[in-house]
Image: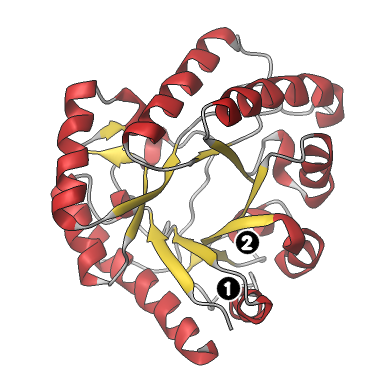
Amino acid sequence: MTQFTLSAFADEASPEFDRQIAALHRKHIPLMEIRGVDGKGILDLTDEELDVVEKKLAAGNIGISAIGSPIGKIGIEDDFAPHFEKFKRAVEIAKKLHTTRIRMFSFYIPEGKNPEIYHDTVIERIQKMVDYGEANDVHCCHENEKGIYGDTLERVEKLHKAIPVLRCVFDPANYIQCGDDPAVNFKALAPIIDYMHIKDALFKDGSVVPAGEGDGSVPSILKALAETGKPYMLTLEPHLYDFSGLQNLQGEDILHKRVYKDADEAFDVASDALHDILKTIE
């Protein structure tokens, strides 16, 4: 059985970076997929602000599992040149914060258009980013996301077949919100999954729930990963509360079944749900 390494989007506990680190300590999570810092997106931080982040991470003994970037969250018909400059900045930040991963996406498709019309453009853009990243020892990690080219199993497989070096981030809840079955998709993608987002949802309305309470087959998927004996990283992405910065996550329709008193409580509920699942498969 493998030992999982845990990470989290700690900005869902608080926009304040100090409180993010405190939340990770509270729930015994050693890594962070860094996305929002003191109300700013990670790619918008200055070099001086990144110096402060680096020092706080070192003092708190917290590592960075990946840059939780918004790269690829633009329309496929939008100008790519300035976006590629943003990607190069993401690579700089990854190196500064001592991580080799950048989480990214495969561009929003205009509503009502056939995604396959844009296949070649998507591949061309991602290949350019992958080539630049790999030349700098930084890996592009593609997350399935509703509304982008790579939102269903069929197109995710096409992406990875065309660009084998592209890494696969598996998000069960996002597949549910696209009408795909995460259990089926996991079996197909298991050989290429780099790491997994722990987020669950319900088929009936797409609402996000704590891991194990939805239709994402999270417990059985984690058991299957554990039985491979390979090391895997699990990144908690609760999406149970309207955390600061949620409005900036373009294209994400977040539905909640419960009410939490604050973001800290929602983060703790999500963390406890993951820890409870892991206890059953240790």
State the separation of the CA atoms marked 1 and 2: 10 Å
Give the structural element (helix, strand or loop) at label 2.
helix
Residue linked to disc 2:
172
> Does any portion of residue 194 appear in the rendered image?
yes
Horizontal arrangement in the rendering, residue 205 relative to residue 6 (left or right): right
Give x and y (percent) for residue 146: 64, 43
Give x and y (percent) for residue 48: 17, 24
- Residue drawn at 59 percent across, 80 percent down: 219
Give x and y (percent) for residue 155: 81, 42
Give the structural element (helix, strand or loop) at label 1.
loop
- Above or below: residue 158 compared with residue 185: above
Give x and y (percent) for residue 202: 61, 67
Q: Quadrant of the N terminus?
A: bottom right
Q: Which corner quadrant of the image does residue 35 belong to?
A: top left
Residue linked to disc 1:
214
- Residue drawn at 45 percent across, 35 percent down: 69
The amino acid beneath tag 1 is Gly
Camera-nearest label, 1 or 2: 2
Q: For this rendering, which residue is in front, 66 or 14?
A: 66
> Does any portion of residue 73 appear in the rendered image?
no
